[in-house]
């Protein structure tokens, strides 16, 4: 018969040595258990935990930034509306009509956007160039002419604004009165500028080239050798600067001067200058020689004139300098006198010049002889007054 007796302390110690329980270190942790299921070792397990913690922190940062992100004005949050007014529909149809879908926009953007307009708008016979801006300007002038001719005023409104505008416009249209004076108004200007050798009214010793250049630019707005105008500073849009750029060619572009002498455009230009001189009373042989000399002189200017693509690049032509620096580079041209005459109310002309770099290189090479050669018989500034270029 077996009986259970209480264990003594010695018995308990002996029993605990026989049955040994697993320690906490020997127990597998939950993390290692999942790591084994995923096939990761200890290092991969710790790396995965670290990446998970980093991703959690990044998620918290992104959520916080999204909640605190300021509202931007570039983001359009309103409803999208379509303009259906007649003006918008007309503008949209003009833009679509000017396009040419046969060209790829990525390979030839200009023909894609303007090819349709070029095909529909041929160059008028009376124009040397034609563009959308010129067409709109012509349309605006035609509309102004129509509105002015429709002005109505009572006899009691004598000397009113409407009366002045209408009578001033009618005086410009009175060709009989204008033709009655013929060349007398222009001859008066030529004689005041020093005369013209073709008409045998030019005196080299009494001729002041600085005064002529100044008055041509300031009083008559003739761009002799260079153009002076005001543009917005590319690097500081809130400030205006004076730009000096190449000019002075009678033909529309410098490429015309590179053609053969028997080209129809060159022959027509020389005939125009010859006829203009003869209208002022010049003999035919002297007028023909004058036309050839002026064309050759303009051809020399065209050789050093930058291309249109260069002048239209704001990065290449942005070359700021002061007036005193320009005077050092070309001492024969009275730059400060010309600028002060063109802009008498300008407070300070020293730092406000922008001159194309290519123009400065060309100006260095010819400025020393240009004014001296202009003083030769038949080569003087008065030819610019009869320039056929509409930009002059």
Image (cartoon, rainbow, N blue to C red):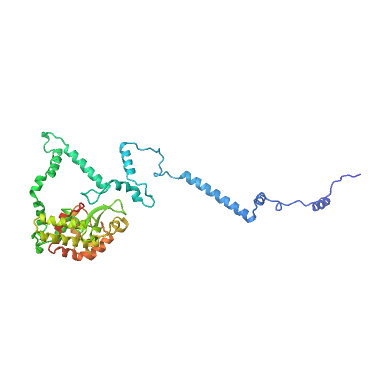
Instruction: Looking at this view, name the residue that lies furthest to the right.
Output: 1
On the image, the x and y values in percent for residue 340 come to 19, 56
On the image, the x and y values in percent for residue 328 come to 22, 64
Is 374 or 236 nearer to us in this picture? 374
Asked where in the image residue 272 lies, by quadrant, the reply is bottom left
Is 175 or 195 nearer to us in this picture? 175
Number of marks in picture:
0
Residue located 19% across and 66% down the image: 369
- Relative to residue 40, is residue 93 drawn left or right? left
On the image, the x and y values in percent for residue 385 come to 15, 55
Residue located 31% across and 55% down the image: 314
Residue 196 shows in this picture? no
- Relative to residue 279, is residue 358 drawn left or right? right
> Which quadrant does the N terminus fall into?
top right
Residue 263 shows in this picture? yes
Residue located 8% across and 48% down the image: 180
Is 354 or 177 nearer to us in this picture? 177
On the image, the x and y values in percent for residue 89 come to 33, 38
Asked where in the image residue 248 lies, by quadrant, the reply is bottom left
Q: Is residue 324 above or below residue 219?
A: below
Asked where in the image residue 260 lies, by quadrant, the reply is bottom left
Q: Is residue 332 above or below residue 11?
A: below
């Amino acid at each position: 018969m077996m009986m259970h007796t209480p264990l003594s302390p010695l018995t308990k110690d002996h029993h605990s040595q026989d049955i040994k329980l697993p320690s906490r270190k020997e127990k597998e942790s939950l993390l290692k258990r999942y790591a084994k299921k995923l096939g990761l070792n200890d290092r991969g397990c710790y790396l995965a935990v670290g990446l998970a913690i980093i991703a959690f922190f990044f998620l918290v940062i992104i959520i916080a930034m999204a909640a605190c992100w300021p509202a931007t004005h570039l983001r359009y949050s309103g409803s999208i509306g379509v303009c259906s007014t007649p003006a918008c529909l007309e503008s949209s149809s003009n833009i679509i009509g000017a396009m040419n879908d046969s060209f790829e926009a990525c390979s030839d953007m200009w023909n894609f956007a303007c090819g349709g307009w070029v095909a529909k708008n041929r160059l008028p016979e009376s124009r040397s160039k034609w563009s959308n801006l010129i067409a709109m300007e012509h349309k605006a002038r035609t509309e102004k002419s129509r509105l002015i001719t429709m002005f109505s005023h009572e006899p009691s409104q004598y000397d009113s604004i409407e009366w002045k505008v209408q009578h001033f416009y009618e005086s410009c249209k009175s060709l009989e009165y204008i033709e009655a004076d013929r060349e007398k108004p222009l001859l008066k200007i030529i004689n005041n500028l020093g005369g013209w050798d073709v008409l045998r009214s030019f005196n080299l010793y009494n001729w002041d080239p600085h005064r002529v250049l100044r008055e041509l630019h300031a009083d008559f707005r003739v761009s002799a050798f260079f153009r002076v105008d005001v543009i917005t500073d590319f690097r500081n849009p809130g400030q205006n600067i004076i730009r000096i750029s190449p000019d002075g060619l009678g033909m529309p572009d410098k490429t015309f001067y590179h053609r053969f002498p028997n080209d129809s455009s060159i022959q027509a230009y020389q005939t125009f200058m010859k006829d203009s001189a003869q209208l002022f009373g010049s003999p035919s042989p002297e007028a023909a020689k004058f036309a050839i000399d002026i064309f050759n002189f303009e051809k020399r200017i065209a050789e050093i004139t930058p291309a249109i693509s260069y002048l239209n690049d704001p990065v290449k032509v942005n070359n700021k300098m002061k007036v005193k620096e320009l005077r050092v580079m070309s001492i024969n041209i009275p730059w400060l006198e010309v600028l002060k005459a063109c802009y008498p109310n300008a407070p300070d002309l020293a730092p406000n010049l922008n001159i194309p770099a290519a123009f400065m290189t060309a100006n260095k090479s010819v400025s020393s002889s240009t004014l001296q050669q202009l003083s030769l018989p038949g080569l003087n500034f008065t030819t610019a007054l009869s320039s056929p270029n509409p930009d002059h």
